[in-house]
Image: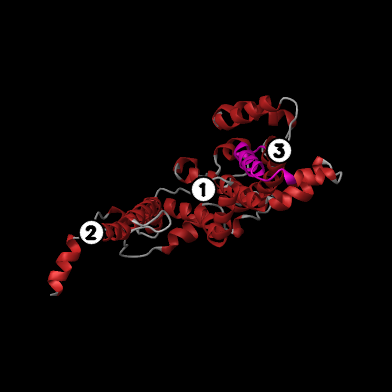
Amino acid sequence: MTAIKNNRLFSDPAYRRQVTIRIRAVLFGASREKRGLVSSILLYFTLTSLALVYFAPILSMFVTSVMIFSDMMNPATNWIPRQFEWSNFYPAAWNALSITPGTWFVPGFTFLQNIGRSTMVNTVVVTLPSALFQVFSCAVAGYAFGRLDFPFKRAAFVLLILVFVVPPQAQLIPLIWTYRGLGILNTPLVFYGPAFFGHGVRGSLFVFVYMQFFRKLPKDLEEAAMVDGVSPLMIFIKVMMPLAKPAFMVVFLFSIVYHWTESLLSSTLYSQFPTLSVRIMMTMDPDAMTGVHVTMRTVQMATGVIMMAPILLLYFFTQRTFTESIERTGLVD
C-alpha cells in the first residue's frame, strides 16, 4: 500500500515539482546567502587550491632552509628532510644578514657607523618612520583629492597617476641627482622626505586608498561642521581623522611591508647602509659578499625565512583588524 501511495504521489506534477525544487536547493542553494552542496564544494576547492598555490612556495622555502647539503642533492627528499640543520639559520644566515649584535661595535668606528653595520637596524630605521609619515601625509592628500575642490586638481591627479604608472627604475637617475644636490644621499632622508610630503614608496597608491575612503563618507558631516564655523583643516582633524582609522591601519601595514621588502631604492640611494632586502640580494651573488661567501641554497632560503618572519608575525596578530579595515576602505569593491 505504501509503494502504491508513493507512486501516486510521484505521478502528481505538483509533488514532482516540489521534490525537484528541494533537490535543487540542496545541491545549488535556495538563495545567494544559502549555498548548496555543489557550490560549497566548488568554493572550498577553489579556496584550498589558491591557498596551496600561495602556501607551497613558503613551505618549500622553509623545508629547504632546514636541509643539509646531502638532502638538497637527494632527489628522493622533497618535503621531509632526513636531518634538520638549524645551523642554517644561526649562525650561517644570521651572520650573512649581519644581524648578530656582536658585529655592530668595532673599535675605530663611531657609534652611528657601528649601528649602520646591522641590516636589521637599517631596515627598522627606514621602515617605521617612513610608514608613520605616509599614514598622515597621504591622508591629507587623499582627503584633498576626495573631498575638496582646488585649482589644477585634475592636473595634479594626472601627475599622481603618472607617478603610479612610471616604474621606479626610470626615476633613479633624477632622484640620485636631486638627493646628491640636496646633500641627503645615503641618509634616511631619501625615504623620510618623500614620505613626509605624501609620496615615498608606493605613496600614490596610499593616496588612492584614502581618496576612496573619504569619498564614501556622507557630506552631512562636513556641512554640519561648516555650519558651526569649523575650518576645512579642523574638519579634517576633528571629524575625518577619527573616522579614518580603518584606512590608517591599511596604509600603515602596507607601507611597512613595502618598505621592509624594498631593495631597488635601498641599494642605490641608501647603499652605504645595507638593509635586509639588499643583504639577501648579496647572498645570491657570492662574489658581492664581504667576508662571507654564501653558496649553499639552504642558507639562502634561511635568509628569506628570516626576512619574511616579522611580516608574517605582524599580519598574524593584526589579520582581523586588517581584514575589517580592507572592507571598510572599499578596496574589495
Does any portion of residue 198 appear in the rendered image?
A: no
Q: Residues within 10 Å of mark 1 (few under 14, many from 20)?
A: few
Label 2 vs 1, first from the N-terminus: 2
Identify the coloring. secondary structure
Question: How many marks on residues?
Answer: 3
Name the side, left or right, on which 224 lies relative to 73.
Answer: right
- Judging by the rendered image, the residue that carries numbered circle 1 is 291
Please state which of residues 197 and 68 is positioned toward the viewer in this rendering.
Answer: 197
- The residue mark sitting in front, 2 or 3, is 2
- Judging by the rendered image, the residue that carries numbered circle 2 is 16
Label 1 vs 3, first from the N-terminus: 3
Query: In percent of the image, x 73 and y 35: which residue is there?
Result: 148
Please state which of residues 107 and 51 is positioned toward the viewer in this rendering.
Answer: 51
In the image, residue 99 above or below residue 231: below
In the image, residue 166 above or below residue 276: above
Please report contact status of discs 2 and 3: CB closer than 8 Å, yes or no. Answer: no
Q: Secondary structure at mark 3?
A: helix
In the image, residue 5 above or below residue 206: below
Q: Amino acid at mark 1?
A: Gly
Please report contact status of discs 2 and 1: CB closer than 8 Å, yes or no. Answer: no
Please state which of residues 331 and 275 is positioned toward the viewer in this rendering.
Answer: 331
Q: Amino acid at mark 2?
A: Arg
Query: In percent of the image, x 70 and y 52: which residue is there?
Result: 243
For the N terminus, give its image quadrant.
Answer: bottom left
Residue 147's disc is 3
Distance from label 1 to label 3 (Cα)?
Answer: 55 Å
- Residue 324: within the magenta? no
- The residue mark sitting in front, 1 or 3, is 3
In the image, which residues are magenta?
197-220
